[in-house]
């Protein structure tokens, strides 16, 4: 009868245990990969039914007890929680305005167009309308900036675009079409600020002036300081109903695939990046990669292709 060799048995047991551990580890990895794929699929299904971000953005209307200085990256609807002496804090998302952090030089550039250029036809708008292009605009875009106010009593016809935001009816349709096209390309776009009434702009501005007066500033000083954070009534593009802030209020938005898609396609739907990085002296407004203005595809394509801002476009083609 063969002898029992305990040494051989011990080695066999060790090999068996080792193989079991390896098999168990491989099984765990496979299970984790399956769970990750399932979660990814569920997330895609959930977001597919909702291309517009439904997150609400609250607006603060009272001065914070901590009296923090307003953020330098946002300049409109958040009218409270700021102190000129303390470090800046970020304003709430829906408070962004295209007038954020206006540059020190408030005088218009000598080459900037005056308001009369708004009613003059340009080379771009003299072309017959393209029946196949629903975003073609025969009129020159209206100019509103720190030096050119919107017409007195001007009230656009606006319509709801979801999540409580509104845009002028033509711009609203162009926005929906652009959002849908981006979604088809795997890009999710949403609005975080759109139309604001003139009365709302007056309310925000007066709140900010009163806030600075409470800090001891004179009336003129308070107005000057308030104008750095809230657009002077009549100079806000949002009151035209043609402007929308998209997705983010951070300058880092320029590094996202959303921004890259917009730069490539926004003009097809009549939108332009309103405040480019290298046009601050012309626009009077700091760089805002999130702020887009509807002007019509015929104007937008020239502006984006030639690297112009709206002021330069009107100066070049509006005579």
Image (spheres, rainbow, N blue to C red):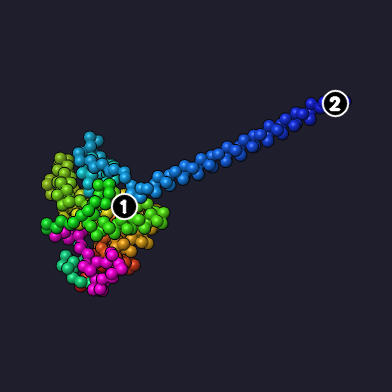
**Picture quadrant of residue 105:** bottom left
Residue visible at 39% across and 49% down in the picture: 48
Q: Secondary structure at mark 2?
A: loop
Residue 159: in sight, yes or no?
yes
Residue visible at 32% across and 51% down in the picture: 190
Is 132 or 153 nearer to us in this picture? 132
Q: Secondary structure at mark 1?
A: strand
Q: Position of residue 58 (x, y in %)?
A: 26, 41
**Picture quadrant of residue 319:** bottom left
Give the spatial CA distance, label 1 vs label 2. Answer: 82 Å
Q: Earlier in the sequence, mark 1 or mark 2?
A: 2
Query: Tags 1 and 2 in contact by the CB under 8 Å rule?
Result: no
**Picture quadrant of residue 179:** bottom left
Q: Which residues are magenta?
A: 123-151
Q: Is residue 142 magenta?
A: yes
Residue visible at 33% across and 64% down in the picture: 268
Is 282 or 266 nearer to us in this picture? 266
Is 141 or 187 nearer to us in this picture? 187
| Left or right side of 41 for 161 | left
Residue 106: in sight, yes or no?
no
Q: Position of residue 313 (x, y in %)?
A: 26, 67
Q: How many marks?
A: 2
Is 175 or 154 nearer to us in this picture? 175
Q: Which residue is mark 1?
A: 246
Main secondary structure found in the magenta portion: loop
Classify the position of the N terminus by image quarter. Answer: top right
Q: Which residue is mark 2?
A: 3
Label 2 crowd (10 A; few <14 / some 14-19 / many >=20): few
Residue visible at 16% across and 65% down in the picture: 115
Label 1 crowd (10 A; few <14 / some 14-19 / many >=20): some
Q: Position of residue 15 (x, y in %)?
A: 72, 34
Q: Position of residue 28 (x, y in %)?
A: 57, 37
């Amino acid at each position: 009868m063969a002898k029992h060799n305990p040494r051989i048995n011990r080695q066999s047991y060790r090999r068996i245990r080792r193989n079991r551990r390896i098999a168990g580890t491989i099984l765990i990895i496979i299970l984790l990969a399956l769970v990750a794929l399932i979660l990814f699929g569920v997330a895609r299904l959930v977001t597919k039914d909702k291309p517009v971000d439904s997150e609400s953005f609250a607006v603060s209307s009272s001065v914070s007890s901590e009296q923090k200085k307003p953020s330098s990256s946002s300049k409109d609807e958040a009218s409270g929680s700021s102190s000129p002496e303390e470090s800046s804090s970020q304003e709430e998302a829906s408070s962004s305005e295209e007038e954020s952090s206006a540059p020190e030089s408030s005088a218009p550039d000598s080459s900037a167009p005056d308001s009369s250029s708004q009613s003059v036809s340009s080379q771009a708008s003299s072309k017959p309308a393209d029946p196949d292009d629903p975003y073609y605009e025969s009129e020159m875009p209206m100019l509103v900036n720190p030096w050119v106010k919107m017409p007195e009593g001007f009230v656009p016809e606006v319509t709801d675009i979801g999540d409580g935001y509104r845009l002028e009816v033509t711009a609203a349709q162009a926005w929906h079409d652009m959002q849908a096209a981006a979604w088809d390309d795997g890009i999710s776009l949403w609005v975080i600020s759109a139309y604001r009434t003139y009365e709302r702009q007056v309310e925000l501005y007066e709140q900010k002036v009163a806030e600075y007066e409470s800090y001891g500033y004179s009336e003129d000083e308070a107005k000057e300081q308030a104008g750095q954070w809230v657009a002077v009534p009549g100079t806000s593009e949002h009151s035209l109903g043609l402007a929308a802030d998209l997705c983010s209020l951070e300058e880092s938005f320029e590094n996202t695939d959303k921004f890259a898609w917009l730069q490539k396609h926004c003009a097809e739907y009549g939108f332009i990046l309103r405040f480019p990085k290298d046009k601050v002296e012309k626009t009077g407004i700091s760089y805002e990669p999130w702020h887009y203005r509807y002007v019509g595809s015929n104007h937008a394509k020239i502006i984006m292709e030639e690297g112009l801002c709206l002021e330069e476009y009107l100066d070049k083609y509006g005579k």
